Image: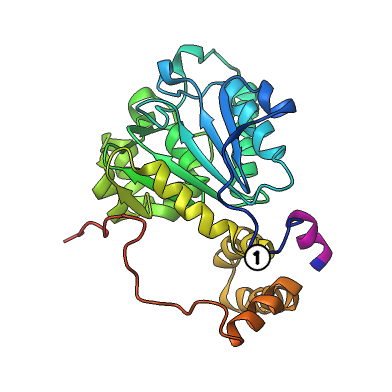
Amino acid sequence: MLNQFRKHAALSDSPEHTLAAAPRPATGALAALDLLRIEHAGPITHVRLNRPAKRNAINDGLVAQLQAAFGGLPGDTRVVVLSGEGAHFSAGLDLSELSERSVAEGVFHSRSWHSAFEQIQFGRVPVVAVLQGAVVGGGLELAASAHIRVAEASAFYGLPEGQRGLFVGGGGSARIPRLIGAARMADMMLTGRVYDAREGQGVGFSQYVVENGQGLATAFELAGKIAANAPLSNFAVLHALPRIADMGQAEGLFVESLMAAIAQGDHAAKDRIQAFLDGKAAKVAQPTGSTGARPPASNG
């Protein structure tokens, strides 16, 4: 089991791994993905949706390229920043390319989205999404597959499938209720309710809200912190934590004990614990607001 985790987390364990490298364009197969712009900056890979004229609406080609990108990340990538070119993260399903499908074809189409977004949620490395403008329909389903979401003040969230005679098909029914609850999701789909950035943070769509134009800087700051973690710890958070949350308490606690033992037995953990004991690692301190993120909006 430990070997399986190390296979997926096969990166340098050194916390001194370079974080401040200059961005460089992707090469090889990733460079051929024309609906995405991909750059690497040290251990951070930046993946941008590249259909700004369509508000980054998601078509079959983009879904396939997202799967290829997240399935083909360089071995030295420790975290991904996901964003959208232009004023919007993604306006959702590209309705102009929606063709008439049989029931079977509709199932296969939905499953292709599931497969691509699974590569994001349960991939090798954490994903930080930057949200601005429209985060709607399939775009919200995509955002929900990321692990950290940074919303700019312009972001707004909607699920117009009910008004279009559709139903979510990109994993939204499984992921979005875990963020905001099934009742709020039903409200959005039945009534067309739209949340702005501050309201969205209050109900759980994002962990951070920042001023317009500050999303990428905040995301890269967070990504740098994530990249400095031990890879096995990050992998455990991605893969063990959500599965434990879906288990009964007894089963979850048993799996937690196994994961804790695996993590603390890794040589990276031993090195980091020793560094802390030797006074070479910082203690947890009161937050200073270094990310520039606003506090959650009040629900009262």
What x and y, as percent, mark residue 120? Answer: 60, 44
Q: Which residue is mark 1?
A: 230
In the image as oriented, which residue stretches furthest toward the right? 3
Q: Residue at x 50, y 77 (%)?
A: 282
> In the rendered view, does 211 fall on the left or right side of 250?
left
Q: Is residue 87 left or right of residue 97?
A: left
From the top left corner, tell me how far across and down residue 190 is, in percent. Answer: 31, 37
Density class for disc 1 (Cα within 10 Å; few <14, some 14-19, many ≥20) is many
Q: Residue at x 54, y 21 (%)?
A: 59
- Image x and y of residue 22, in percent: 57, 40
Q: Nearer the viewer, residue 225 or 63?
A: 225
Answer yes or no: is residue 181 visible: no
Q: Main secondary structure of the magenta part?
A: helix
Residue located at (77% from left, 56% from top): 10
Please state the extent of the stretch shown in magenta in the rendering. Answer: 3-8
- State whether residue 34 is above or below residue 223: above
Q: Is residue 48 left or right of residue 260?
A: left
Q: In the rendered image, which quarter is residue 259 located in?
A: bottom right
| Percent x, y of residue 41 | 59, 42
Q: Amino acid at mark 1?
A: Ala
* Residue 200 in view, yes or no: yes
